[in-house]
């Protein structure tokens, strides 16, 4: 599987999932800044990872600041931003990644069948540290309204 | 007719969304029951009758496919219509689920209309089948 193809389906899946389930319009930033530069002031970030196996294997990840997750989770659950617990934010970010992965791999078509693992929560700053050595070409910088998110993949 | 619905998904946010979608779709629901995986769902089914079960596939402990497999072994549970609501959309996975006995397959992300349409079609059929039984209709030519 070519990285370029994976990047293409991931972008499409992110747009579809965030628009359909979270009512957010998405744009992708073309800059090549690092994740620390993308989230300069954020102390509190929530992340999730999910493994995949198939014609190739690896993992997908997503990270979002609390401010963005307040809005995303509120939209998802149809509740007020101040009624959302941290547990619900973690669950929402995991489910968002699960849907992005599943939808993205389904866009590959009939031949390529991938199996997804169970999504895991990870503290956002830890995830960013883990991704330091990862190529910025495998990172997707996302703007959803006034919110910033990031996602990407690691191919084994 | 009020229907009892069992929603099986390891994400409580997703269970909540599905529940909300069913509510706004105008179905008269008697009870909403929830389970975080197949094993929990089977425990719920010991004590509760449900008219329809919506399940994710990819869950810890017992996944959605294993849950259908267990339900098929039971004479009563095998008659409950099961709808997969899942991110897994490969043709092979859909075929496997339908061959296992799933009555519907909804891909996440979904639009509320997809849930409504699938439930209408399945519960409509179930209602028709129940009416036939109640009226003693045995099928065949008139």
Image: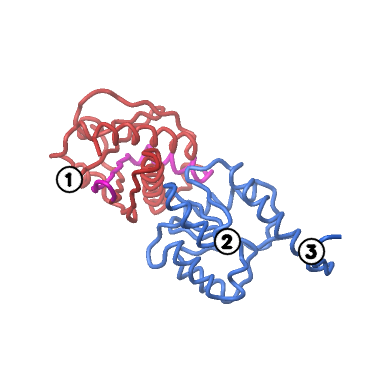
Chain colours: A red, B blue
> Looking at the image, is mark 1 or mark 3 nearer the viewer?
3
Q: CA distance from mark 2 to mark 3?
A: 27 Å
Q: Chain of mark 2?
A: B
Residue that lies at the very extreme toward the right in this rendered image? B142
Label 3 Cα neighbours within 10 Å, binned few <14 / some 14-19 / many ≥20: few
Q: Quick check: B140 left or right of B27?
A: right
Both marks 2 and 3 on one chain: yes
**Which residues, given as a range, are shown in magenta?**
A54-79
Which residue is found at the position 40% from the left and 42% from the top?
Answer: A110
How many labels, in total?
Answer: 3
Residue that lies at the very extreme toward the left in this rendered image? A133
Taking B118 as reference, is A20 above or below it? above
Q: Where on the picture, by quarter, is residue B45? A: bottom right
Report the quarter where the N terminus of chain A lies.
top left
Label 3 sits on residue: B139
Q: Chain of mark 3?
A: B
Q: Position of residue B136 (x, y in %)?
A: 83, 69
Q: CA distance from mark 1 to mark 2?
A: 40 Å
Q: Compare residues A31 and A138 and report the one nearer the observer.
A: A138
Query: What element does badge 1 sit on?
Result: helix
**Magenta region includes residue A66:** yes
> Looking at the image, is mark 1 or mark 2 nearer the viewer?
2
Label 2 Cα neighbours within 10 Å, binned few <14 / some 14-19 / many ≥20: some
State the mark number for residue B53.
Answer: 2
Which residue is found at the position 64% from the left and 46% from the top?
Answer: B117
> Looking at the image, is mark 2 or mark 3 nearer the viewer?
3
Q: Quick check: A17 left or right of A113?
A: right
State the mark number for residue A130.
Answer: 1
């Amino acid at each position: 599987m070519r990285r370029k193809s994976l990047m293409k389906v991931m972008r499409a899946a992110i747009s579809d999932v965030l628009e359909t389930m979270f009512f957010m319009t998405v744009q992708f930033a073309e800059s090549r800044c690092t994740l620390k530069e993308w989230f300069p002031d954020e102390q509190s970030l929530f992340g999730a990872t999910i493994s995949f196996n198939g014609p190739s294997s690896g993992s997908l990840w997503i990270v979002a600041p609390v401010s963005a997750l307040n809005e995303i989770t509120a939209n998802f659950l149809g509740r007020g931003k101040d009624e959302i617990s941290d547990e619900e934010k973690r669950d929402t970010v995991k489910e968002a990644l699960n849907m992005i992965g599943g939808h993205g791999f389904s866009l590959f078509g009939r031949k390529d069948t991938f199996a997804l693992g169970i999504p895991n929560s990870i503290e956002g700053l830890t995830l960013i540290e883990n991704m330091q050595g990862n190529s910025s070409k495998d990172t997707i910088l996302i703007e959803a309204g006034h919110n910033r998110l990031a996602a990407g993949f690691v191919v084994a | 007719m009020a229907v009892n619905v069992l929603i099986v998904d390891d994400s409580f946010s997703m269970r909540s969304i599905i529940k909300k979608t069913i509510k706004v779709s105008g179905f008269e629901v008697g009870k909403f029951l929830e389970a975080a995986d197949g094993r929990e769902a089977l425990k719920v089914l010991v004590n509760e009758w449900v008219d329809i079960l919506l399940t994710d596939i990819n869950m810890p402990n017992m996944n959605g496919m294993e849950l259908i497999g267990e339900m098929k072994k039971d004479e009563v549970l095998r008659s409950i219509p099961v709808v997969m609501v899942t991110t897994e959309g490969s043709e092979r996975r859909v075929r496997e689920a339908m061959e296992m006995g799933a009555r519907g397959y909804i891909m996440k992300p979904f639009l509320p209309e997809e849930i409504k349409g699938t439930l209408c079609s399945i519960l409509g059929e179930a209602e028709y089948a129940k009416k036939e039984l109640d009226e003693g209709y045995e099928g065949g030519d008139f």
